[in-house]
Image (spheres, grey):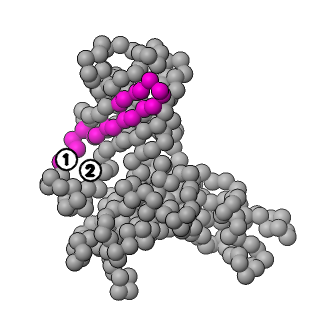
Amino acid sequence: MKPFLLILVLSLLVPAIGQENVLAQSKTDLVGTWKLVSATETTKKGEVRGFGHNPTGFITYTADGRVMLIITNGGRKPLSTSDYTTAPIEERAEAFATMTAYAGHYTLNGDKVIHHIEVLDAKCCKHRPSASYHQPERQLLDPANSPDKLPIDPNGVYFVLASKNVMQQSVPSQFCAWHSYGIAQDGKSGSGTAIKVAFIGDSDQFPSACQWQNPSPNNNPAADAAANFIAHELSETVTDPEFNAWTNPGVIENGDLCQWTFGTTKLLPNGSSYNLIFGTRPYLIQRIWVNARGGYCALALDE
């Protein structure tokens, strides 16, 4: 996903629990639970997006500087069943995509309240801003092609699949996986080569944010989730390898446009869903945006 500055503007908030309708001038004025009247988000390009007609939400500020927010889009459809675990996957995907929630701490800067997000509803995948690679990514690459290093391939994509003892600062507080690019320096010639890298976090550490179902098609939720994220990040790396190629007008990449949507699925004996077979194994893999016939999400061009 292309980077953008997300500015959540709560244009008018009124206290939810018997407080007066006043504008906060200090932390003391701000503390409490407030009910949403309207909200917009503004991208770095100045594009303004809404949350549908009459969104609902609450935001809570605590005296010790914590903030918690939840917004559901206007017109959000209820699930067809009271048990969300048995609802159709398409319904669950839409419900997930039409809710925004996060928590963190806040600071005041004049008449502005700045939210520093620490935990949010990880809507799958984004990319990390490009940079010169350091540890551990840089350790993977060596133009000398020594036995324990990989050769530098400008046409390749280097995937880092994290094990259970590997933590990455942005997973899952911002996303479950990401792709990026950077310059790998040749120690002999001093020249640099642009390489593409993707990071797939260990979803067992954060199953509620990064695993769609448990049990999963192969009774290995972390591996099945990783397969889905690999497909997502590989597609985005091919179509937008250095963040200057294809996105839609909203600066959204082709994987993000269809994230958490799977099309027609089938049930397995263990109760999990799948939509593709690779070899003899079933998988649940998200659809990808097809930029033809007005645009649509699909697993194949002829769908």
Asked if residue 96 lies left or right of residue 197, the reply is left
Is any atom of residue 238 visible in this view?
Answer: no
Residue at point 73%, 82% (across, down): 147
| Foreground pick, 127 / 302 | 127
Checking the image for residue 63, the label placed there is: none
Is disc 1 placed on a helix, strand or loop? loop
Q: Quadrant of residue 279?
A: bottom left
Res. 77 mark: 1
Q: Is residue 154 left or right of residue 52?
A: right
Q: Is residue 81 magenta?
A: no
Quadrant of image for the C terminus: bottom left
Q: Residue furthest bottom?
A: 280
For marks 1 and 2, give the CA distance: 7 Å
Q: Amino acid at mark 1?
A: Lys
Of 99 and 201, the residue lying toward us: 201
For mark 2, does the 10 Å Cα neighbourhood hold few (<14), some (14 to 19), or many (20 or more) residues?
A: some
The residue that appears at 26% across and 21% down in the rendered structure is 17
Question: SS of the residue at dot 2?
Answer: helix
Does residue 176 sit above or below 303 in this rendering? Answer: above
Q: Are marks 1 and 2 in contact (CB under 8 Å)?
A: yes
Q: Which residues are magenta?
A: 59-78
Q: How many residues crowd around disc 1 within 10 Å: few (fewer than 14), some, or many (20 or more)?
A: few
Where does residue 194 sit, x and y in percent of width and height? 68, 63
Q: Which residue is mark 2?
A: 95
Which three-letter amino acid code belongs to the residue tagged 2?
Ala
Q: Is residue 77 magenta?
A: yes
**Residue 227 at x, y percent in the picture:** 43, 71
Q: Earlier in the sequence, mark 1 or mark 2?
A: 1
Query: In this picture, is 143 found above or below 70?
Result: below
Q: Residue at x 76, y 79 (%)?
A: 146
